[in-house]
């Protein structure tokens, strides 16, 4: 059996099959568009409310520094309005400047100057509090220098060196301020993980449909006549399937590249997710072989392909995150290659589980096609 000829023949058939090729192009365009929308949403500034309980000049100065930040959309508010905004998902956090902020700044006391409230599902807590701390450091240093300017100007070299050393130690501590961070539950919880690699996940989900629908040739694997002819020529059924499935996997992987380029920020993420998709496509081909072998003909395949695609993709979390009450189905979804690709798109460990799941689906497909072939032979 010439497996190279099988590979070339299937590649030629896919490239010249404009119907299935157009399906893949549409999937790539839709996923790229979703990536574009998702990127725009991620670039939107996160709204943060500022509540000023301090009447001193340094509280006002701190507010001005916060308002100049471009990473977050800081705005002035009252405490009641800020709590209402965070409950209704109109704000992601609250910065409360305490009553004695200016007094403590003048005295060089940097303990418990502000309190921070952050949504319980926000992924911005660390970077958000870091921004607030850094801005408070600026104010504290400015006040310190202003109050000691004359003294420093008259100080000798030894005192200046001591001042520089103390300042350096303060900066090295990282968390200069005693920031009180409260995590709150919101009425409308959102999970920012859902916005990660959205276009990539949609491409993986929709490309499963492409792999199934373009695998009409797999229907013949349930035919006893085909298997008998192949075995009679000394062919290995697994190698024969791989040689014919590989072109579809390659085309699907190529279609993913523009979406990957749009959503990944570095080469390492690009390569890891591409690797994850290649492994995913192996499992998807196994699922396609199972579906095609059981369908037996194109008419049944057309009806079953969308159902299988939606079921596997929804359970895997590729299209939407499963609700909290669907924990059982989320745990069950590890049997699908899509679940492991979902984990890869979120930077989690995936390779061992993804490889095992994909190989099991591939072997299951070959086994089921062989069983159906034997049943048809005996009937």
Image: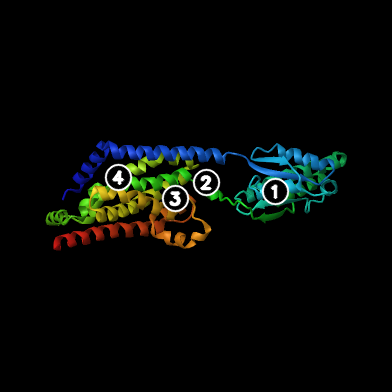
Q: Position of residue 162 (x, y in %)?
A: 79, 48
Q: Are marks 4 and 2 in contact (CB under 8 Å)?
A: no
In whole angstroms, how far apart are the C-alphas of marks 4 and 3?
20 Å
- Determine if residue 357 is in view: yes
Q: Residue at x 38, y 45 (%)?
A: 206
Q: Which residue is mark 2?
A: 195
- Determine if residue 133 is in view: no
Q: Are marks 4 and 3 in contact (CB under 8 Å)?
A: no
Where disc 3 sits, the SS reads loop
Give the crowd class for mark 4: few <14, some 14-19, many >=20 residues within 10 Å. Answer: many
Q: Which residue is mark 3?
A: 318
Q: Nearer the viewer, mark 1 or mark 2?
A: 1
Q: Residue at x 39, y 60 (%)?
A: 335
In whole angstroms, how far apart are the C-alphas of marks 1 and 3?
33 Å
Q: Can you tell which mark lies on residue 248?
A: 4
Q: Are marks 3 and 2 in contact (CB under 8 Å)?
A: no
Q: What scheme was used to colour the molecule?
A: rainbow
Q: Is residue 217 left or right of residue 144?
A: left
Q: Nearer the viewer, mark 4 or mark 2?
A: 2
């Amino acid at each position: 059996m010439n497996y190279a000829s099988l590979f070339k023949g299937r590649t030629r058939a896919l490239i010249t099959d404009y119907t299935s090729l157009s399906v893949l192009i549409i999937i790539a365009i839709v996923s790229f568009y979703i990536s574009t929308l998702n990127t725009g949403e991620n670039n939107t500034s996160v709204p943060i409310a500022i509540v000023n309980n301090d009447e001193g000049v340094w509280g006002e100065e701190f507010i001005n520094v916060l308002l100049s930040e471009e990473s977050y959309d800081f705005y002035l508010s009252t405490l009641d309005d800020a709590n209402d905004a965070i409950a209704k998902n109109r704000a992601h956090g609250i910065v409360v400047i305490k009553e004695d902020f200016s007094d403590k700044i003048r005295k060089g006391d940097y303990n418990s100057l502000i309190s921070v409230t952050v949504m319980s599902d926000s992924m911005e807590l660390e970077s958000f509090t870091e921004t607030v701390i850094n801005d408070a450091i600026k104010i504290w240093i400015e006040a310190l220098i202003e109050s000691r300017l004359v003294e420093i100007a008259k100080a000798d070299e030894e005192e200046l060196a001591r001042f520089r050393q103390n300042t350096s130690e303060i900066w090295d501590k990282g968390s200069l301020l005693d920031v009180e961070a409260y995590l709150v539950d919101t009425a409308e919880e959102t999970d920012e993980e859902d916005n990660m690699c959205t276009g990539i996940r949609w491409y993986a989900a929709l490309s499963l449909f492409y792999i199934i629908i373009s695998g009409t040739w797999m229907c013949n694997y349930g035919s006893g006549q085909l298997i008998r002819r192949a075995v009679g020529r000394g062919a290995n059924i697994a190698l024969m399937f791989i040689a014919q499935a590989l072109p579809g996997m390659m085309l699907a992987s190529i279609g993913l590249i523009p979406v990957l380029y749009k959503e990944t920020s570095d080469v390492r993420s690009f390569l890891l997710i591409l690797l994850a998709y290649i492994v995913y496509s192996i499992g998807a081909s196994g699922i396609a072989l199972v579906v095609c072998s059981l369908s037996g003909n194109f008419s049944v395949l057309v009806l079953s392909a969308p159902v299988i695609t939606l079921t596997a993709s929804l359970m895997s979390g590729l299209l939407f995150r499963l609700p909290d009450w669907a924990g059982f189905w989320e745990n069950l979804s590890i049997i699908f290659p899509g679940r492991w690709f979902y984990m890869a798109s979120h930077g989690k460990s995936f390779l061992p589980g993804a490889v095992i799941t994909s190989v099991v689906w591939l072997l299951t497909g070959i086994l089921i096609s062989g069983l159906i072939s034997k049943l048809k032979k005996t009937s």
